[in-house]
Image (tube, rainbow, N blue to C red):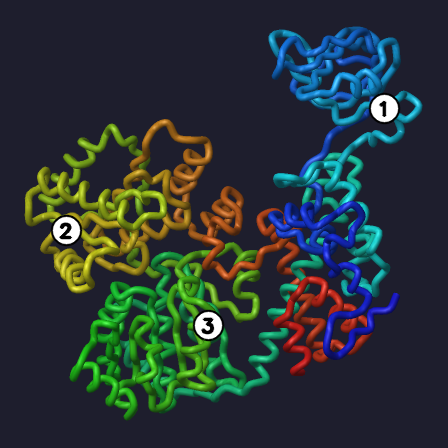
């Protein structure tokens, strides 16, 4: 049961699981290349490729009364062979069970082989998928043909694995069995109290049970063996995040404490009082900034929950302490929006807030950089332009990053390097279900804004089918004549920005023809920056009544007078995105409307998605529904989500395990920071098994 780990490499107990796949029985280089298409390249990967379904192969006396298609196992007598009538036709074998006759059907068959396998007059046990063709009951290519004495070789419940071209169920089963033979007993890395409470089996037993399900219920995420294996993945992942968090806390930050003077001035200038959630988040952030460890906090808030004010208060703590803060946004539109709302409040406190984007050139840019380096600019707001080498701060204390999943981790680290020990606050307006935020941001501390500031009016959401677009245009004409403003968001056309742009331009021309030239504006991602800003500016000033847009307006655009949101082909958007778009209205005192235009007929999922949106404005509930409907990867866009890819754990259906894994990992590290206890040593083996290289490096450093 040795789990000793050499200081430099993988523990020897794991060597058999990380050998080449072609070291397993019956797998040569060609088969190994087929397996590689499933991301299976070592025995370890096979262990974590669990059956995805199963076939009930319990014996029955007859197939009479079954409703095809269905898997059936029955003993039959072979009556006669009916060879293929012509090339390309199947060879048929007529058989009879206790009550009825049916046919076994074989394509591209060798007659001599079939006559030997199924001699006329013999009794055979056959198991396969029963179908009807031309009103004839038949079983094409049975999965099993055995003599009755050999029937025990057919399991009552047979696991079915996910496959790829060149891999059959038989090959997969044999390869999995060969990989399982290499599994040895290992020291337990799960907390003994948790194991006992959950009744989970040991690791090796869990693997064997998961690969040999006895009932359909054994395939469910709730089954004990699967839960335990999922927990192993989540625990290894959370242990890695906890090690990263502990490492970051070891690097001391700067104790940034303000006297509250600047913040008091801003609060006095506000026409409203902050919500309880905002006040709580401000206090958590200020406490983190004043602590010796470097802050790494996520501020998660629903649409319109007031994240910008919380961010400004954090930036002012930095300025009060004699330092500087930077706020970085993913797009220029959003950076300008932040600057427009922050600069007047900063000015009220006597603080200089400037914006820096890729558009700043020449003398103007040089002047801003000089003022920044001298410490004359207290708050800098910008796009990724703030990463450039020539941007130097006098004393950067806080970096605020808005909409983080649009930035890579490398960019976050670059920004952090601008102030070697600067605190980091990440903001996201996308409510993320707790299980996903723990998977994605589990190394961070969390502040949640779950209240709306006063003065925001509820938005009435309606579903309208696309043939009624002329009625919608007529209503828009009346609303614009009455001084109201509206967004018209055009459909998401596949993944092509050019097609999105065409859809927006076409709709823009139609609305301009219907409503009048000067009343309709247009923004899309392909427009030059100045043109886009001019269109946004004209809309913000009320010069245009309708703004036609692609999803560039999804995040952060704030025009309080806009009270109508039309989303065309709403069924092509994700729930979270629809919720973001709807959040652009309802920002002023006027009653607001969101019209979801859909193309009938709607799929069942499309209908459900739009109905959820009509029922609730609670972003966290919407996010949970989105997760259930679309899965974790689709919901955030796996390519840029930073979400780990788990082979067994199901974030949608095993959400509770993630929270458990986080608290367990943090507790283990608190009790045993170097992972030297027996359980700590076992946890090291788990990290190697789950290929958590980052964690292994951190342990070595520690």
Q: Mark 1 — residue?
A: 146
Q: Secondary structure at mark 2?
A: strand
Label 2 or label 1, whichever lies nearer to me, is 1
Label 2 or label 3, whichever lies nearer to me, is 3
Disc with the residue nearer the chain's start (3 vs 1): 1
Q: Residue at x 82, y 65 (%)?
A: 13
For marks 3 and 1, give the CA distance: 59 Å
Which mark is on residue 159? none
Q: Identify which residue, 337 or 509, lies in the foreground.
A: 509
For marks 2 and 3, give the CA distance: 37 Å
Disc with the residue nearer the chain's start (2 vs 3): 3
Q: Mark 3 — residue?
A: 410
Q: Secondary structure at mark 3?
A: helix
- Which quadrant is home to the N terminus? bottom right
Against 160, residue 289 (above or below) is: below
Question: How many neighbours does mark 2 have within 10 angstroms: few (below 14), some (14-19), or many (20 or more)?
Answer: many
Question: Where is residue 125 drawn, in percent x and y?
Answer: 84, 20
Instruction: Give the residue furthest to the right.
Output: 149
């Amino acid at each position: 049961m040795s789990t000793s780990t050499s200081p430099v490499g993988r523990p020897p107990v794991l060597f058999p699981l990380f050998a080449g796949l072609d070291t397993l029985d019956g797998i040569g280089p060609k088969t190994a290349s087929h397996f590689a298409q499933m991301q299976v390249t070592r025995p370890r990967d096979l262990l974590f490729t669990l059956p995805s379904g199963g076939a009930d192969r319990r014996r029955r006396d007859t197939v009479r009364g079954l409703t095809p298609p269905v898997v059936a196992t029955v003993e039959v007598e072979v009556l006669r062979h009916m060879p293929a009538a012509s090339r390309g036709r199947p060879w048929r074998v007529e058989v009879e069970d206790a009550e009825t006759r049916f046919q076994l059907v074989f394509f591209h068959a060798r007659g001599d082989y079939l006559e030997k396998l199924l001699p006329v007059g013999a009794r055979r046990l056959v198991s396969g998928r029963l179908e009807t063709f031309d009103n004839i009951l038949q079983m094409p290519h049975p999965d099993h043909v055995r003599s009755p004495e050999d029937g025990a070789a057919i399991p009552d419940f047979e696991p079915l694995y996910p496959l790829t071209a060149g891999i059959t169920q038989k090959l997969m089963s044999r390869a999995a069995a060969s990989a399982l033979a290499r599994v040895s007993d290992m020291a337990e890395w799960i907390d003994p109290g948790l194991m006992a409470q959950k009744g989970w089996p040991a690791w090796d037993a869990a693997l064997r049970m998961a690969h040999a399900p006895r009932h359909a219920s054994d395939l469910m995420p709730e089954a004990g063996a699967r839960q335990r294996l999922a927990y192993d993945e989540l625990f290894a992942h959370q242990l890695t995040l906890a090690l990263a968090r502990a490492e970051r806390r070891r690097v001391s930050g700067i104790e940034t404490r303000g006297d509250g003077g600047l913040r008091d001035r801003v609060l006095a200038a506000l026409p409203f009082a902050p919500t309880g959630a905002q006040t709580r988040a401000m206090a958590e952030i200020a406490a983190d900034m004043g602590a010796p460890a470097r802050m790494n906090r996520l501020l998660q808030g629903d649409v319109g929950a007031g994240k910008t004010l919380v961010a400004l208060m954090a930036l002012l703590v930095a300025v009060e302490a004699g330092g500087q803060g930077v706020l970085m946004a993913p797009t220029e539109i959003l950076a300008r929006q932040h600057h427009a709302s922050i600069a007047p409040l900063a000015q009220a406190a006597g603080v200089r807030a400037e914006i820096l984007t890729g558009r700043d050139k020449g003398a103007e840019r040089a002047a801003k950089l000089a003022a920044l380096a001298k410490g004359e600019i207290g708050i800098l707001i910008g796009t990724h332009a703030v990463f450039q080498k020539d941007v130097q701060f006098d004393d950067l204390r806080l970096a605020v990053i808005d909409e983080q999943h649009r930035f890579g981790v490398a960019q976050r680290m670059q920004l952090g390097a601008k102030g070697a020990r600067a605190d980091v606050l990440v903001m996201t307006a996308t409510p993320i279900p707790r299980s996903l935020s723990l998977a994605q941001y589990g190394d961070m501390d969390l502040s949640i804004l779950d209240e709306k500031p006063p003065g925001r009016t509820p938005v009435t959401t309606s579903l309208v089918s696309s043939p009624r677009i002329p009625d919608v245009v007529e209503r828009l004409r009346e609303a614009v004549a009455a001084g109201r403003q509206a967004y018209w968001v055009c459909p998401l056309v596949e993944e092509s920005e050019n097609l999105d742009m065409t859809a927006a331009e076409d709709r823009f021309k139609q609305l301009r023809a219907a409503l009048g030239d000067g009343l309709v504006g247009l923004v899309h991602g392909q427009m030059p920056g100045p043109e886009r800003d001019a269109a946004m500016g004209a809309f913000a000033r009320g010069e245009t009544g309708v703004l036609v847009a692609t999803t560039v307006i999804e995040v952060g655009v704030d025009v309080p007078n806009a009270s109508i949101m039309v989303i065309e082909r709403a069924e092509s958007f994700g729930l979270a995105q629809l919720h973001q778009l709807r959040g652009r209205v309802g920002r002023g005192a006027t009653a607001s409307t969101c019209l979801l235009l859909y193309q009938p007929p709607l799929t069942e999922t499309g209908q459900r998605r739009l109905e959820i949106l009509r029922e609730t404005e609670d972003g966290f509930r919407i996010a949970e529904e989105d997760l259930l409907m679309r899965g974790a990867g689709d919901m955030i866009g796996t390519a840029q989500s930073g979400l780990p890819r788990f082979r067994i754990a199901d974030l949608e259906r095993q959400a509770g395990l993630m929270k458990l894994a986080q608290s367990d990992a943090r507790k283990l590290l608190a009790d045993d920071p170097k992972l030297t206890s027996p359980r700590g040593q076992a946890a090291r083996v788990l990290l190697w098994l789950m290929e958590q290289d980052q964690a292994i490096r951190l342990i070595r450093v520690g």
